[in-house]
Amino acid sequence: MHLNGKTSAPSRDLSKVKAPLQKGKNFQARESLLDQLLEVNHIQTIQHMFVALLILFVVSTLIVDYIDQGRLVLDFELLSFAFGKLQWVLTTWLAMFVGTLFVPYYLLSYWTRNYQTAIHHQLNNTGAKPLLLAPLGITLLYAVPYLAFQLIGLGMFPLYFVVKFDLPPASRFIVIIEQIRFMMKTHSFVRENIPKCMYIEDSQVVIPSLSQYLYFLFCPTLIYRDTYPRTPKIRWTYVGIKFSQVLGCLFYTYYVFTRLCIPMYKNIYNEPFTIKVLVLNIFHSILPGILIFFLAFFSFLHCWLNMFAEMLRFADRMFYEDWWNCTSFAQYFRKWNVVVHDWLFYYVYRDFLGVFPRRFRVAATLSVFLLSAVIHEYILTVCFGFFYPVLFFLFICFGMVLKFLLDGENKGPVYNIMMWAKLFLGQGVLLSLYSQEWYAQIHCPPTQGVLWDIVVPRSWSCYQWG
C-alpha cells in the first residue's frame, strides 16, 4: 500500500483480531434459596418463631423498665450510639463513591485509547507483532495513579475519616464495609476489562459505558459483566418486605445485646476472674452469638442483597447456598457467602494459579484464607477500635486446618451436627472474648506506651484473676 508516495510495511487485518470469550462465573436467572423455602408452610413456622421471640424481647424490656423505672417507654440509646455521626458516614461514602465511579473508569478509558493507538501504530509500521509487546510505559503511566487511588483514595482516606471523627462502631462498620466493597468492585471492573481492551475488534475501542459501570457498582455481585440477566419488572411490595425485615433484624440485634449480652458483661471487671468464669461466659454467649450470626446472615445476605437485586432487576439471586446442610468447613466456606467466594476464587485463587504452576494449589488456597482472615480482622479492629485477633486466630488455626483435614465429601447427620457444634462454639468464643475486651477498654485506662496498648489486649491485665 502507498501512503504519500511511500511504501509502508504490510498491514495486519485488524478485523481478524478478536477479543477472547469471557470466562468465569456464568450468571443466570434464579431465586434465592430462602425465598423458595419460605413458600413452604413448615419453614415459615420457623420464621414465625423468631418473630415471636422478638415480640417477647420487646414485652420483657417494657416490663423490666416499668418495674425498675416506672415508665413504659422503649429506649434505643444503644442504637443511637452505635449509628451516631451519620453525617460523616454519608460524607465519606459520597467521596468514596464519586472517586470509585470516575477515577478507575476514566483511567481505563484513557489507557485503552492510548494502548490501542500504540498497537495500531505498531502494526501499521513494523508489521504484525504480538499485542503484549505494546509499550510498557503506557500501562505504567495509568497503573501508577490507579494503584495510588486504591491505596490512598479508597484505603487511607476512609480510615482517616473514621479515626479523625471518632465514629461509633456501627457507623465505622458501614464505612469500612463500603470501602472494601468499592475496592473489590474496582478491581473486578479493571481486571475483567483489561484483557478485552488489549484486543482490537474492527478498529473500535472496546470500553464499557459509564452506565454499565454505574449499574455494576450497585448490583449485588462483585464480578463485573457488561450485561446481567434481568427480571421483567420490579416488585415494590417485595422490596418493602425485605426492607422491613432488615429493620426488624436490626432491632432484633439490639434486643439480643441489651437483654442477653450487656447485663452479662458490663460489670464483669468488678468480679474476680477465673478460668471457670471464662468458660461459663463462653457457653453463656453461645445463644446470643448464634442469634446474631443468624440475624447477620438473614438481614444482609438474604434481605439486603435481594432488596437491591429486585430494585435493579438483577435476576441472579444465588447469594448463598444451603450452607446449613454442610458437613465440612470446605463446603461451608464455599456456600456461606457466594458473592465474596466468587471474587476470591476468580481473582485470588485462579489468578494465583495463572501465575504459578498448578502444583501450587495449596499455596493458592492458603493465600485465599490469609487474605480473607486479614480483611475480617481489619474490619473488626477498625470497628471496635482495638486489636484483638481472635477471629484471625480461629480463621487460620481452626478454619483453615479443618478445611484441609475434612475436605472430603463427608456425608451423614453426624458430620452436620459436628459442623453446627463448631459454629455454635465459635460464635460463643467470639462474642465472649470481644465483649470482655470492649469493656476492658472502657474501664481500664492504659498503663503502658501507645504501641503496647494497641498490641496487647487490655482484658489480659484489666481483670483481677482469682
Image (cartoon, helix red, strand yellow):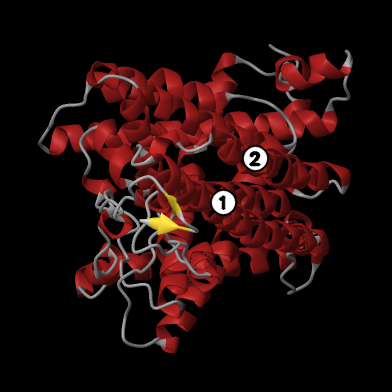
Q: Position of residue 119 (x, y in %)?
A: 45, 47
Residue at horizontal 21 percent and vertical 46 percent from the top: 325
Crowd tier of the residue under label 2, counting other residues whose Cα lies within 10 Å: few below 14, some 14–19, many 20 or above: few
Q: In this orientation, which residue lies closer to the viewer: 278 or 331?
A: 331
Number of numbered discs on residues: 2
For mark 1, give the secondary structure: helix
Marker disc for residue 141: 2
Q: Quadrant of residue 352?
A: top left
Crowd tier of the residue under label 1, counting other residues whose Cα lies within 10 Å: few below 14, some 14–19, many 20 or above: some
Could you tell me which quadrant the N terminus lies in?
bottom left
Q: In this orientation, which residue lies closer to the viewer: 51 or 309?
A: 309
Q: Position of residue 14 (x, y in %)?
A: 32, 56
Could you tell me which quadrant the C terminus lies in?
top right
In the displayed structure image, the side of residue 267 where residue 325 appears, left or right:
left
Q: Quadrant of residue 225?
A: bottom left
Disc 2 residue type (three-letter): Leu
In whole angstroms, how far apart are the C-alphas of marks 2 and 1? 10 Å
Disc 1 residue type (three-letter): Asn
Q: Position of residue 53 (x, y in %)?
A: 46, 64
In the displayed structure image, the side of residue 372 where residue 399 appears, left or right:
left
Q: Can see residue 191?
A: no
For mark 2, give the secondary structure: helix
Q: Quadrant of residue 383?
A: top right
Q: Can see residue 393?
A: yes
The label nearer to you, 2 versus 1, is: 1
| 310 to 279, vertically: above or below | below
Q: Are marks 2 and 1 in contact (CB under 8 Å)?
A: yes
* Lower sequence index among marks 2 and 1: 1
In the displayed structure image, the side of residue 258 where residue 54 appears, left or right:
left
The residue indicated by pointer 1 is: 114
Residue at horizontal 43 percent and vertical 53 percent from the top: 197
Marker disc for residue 70: none
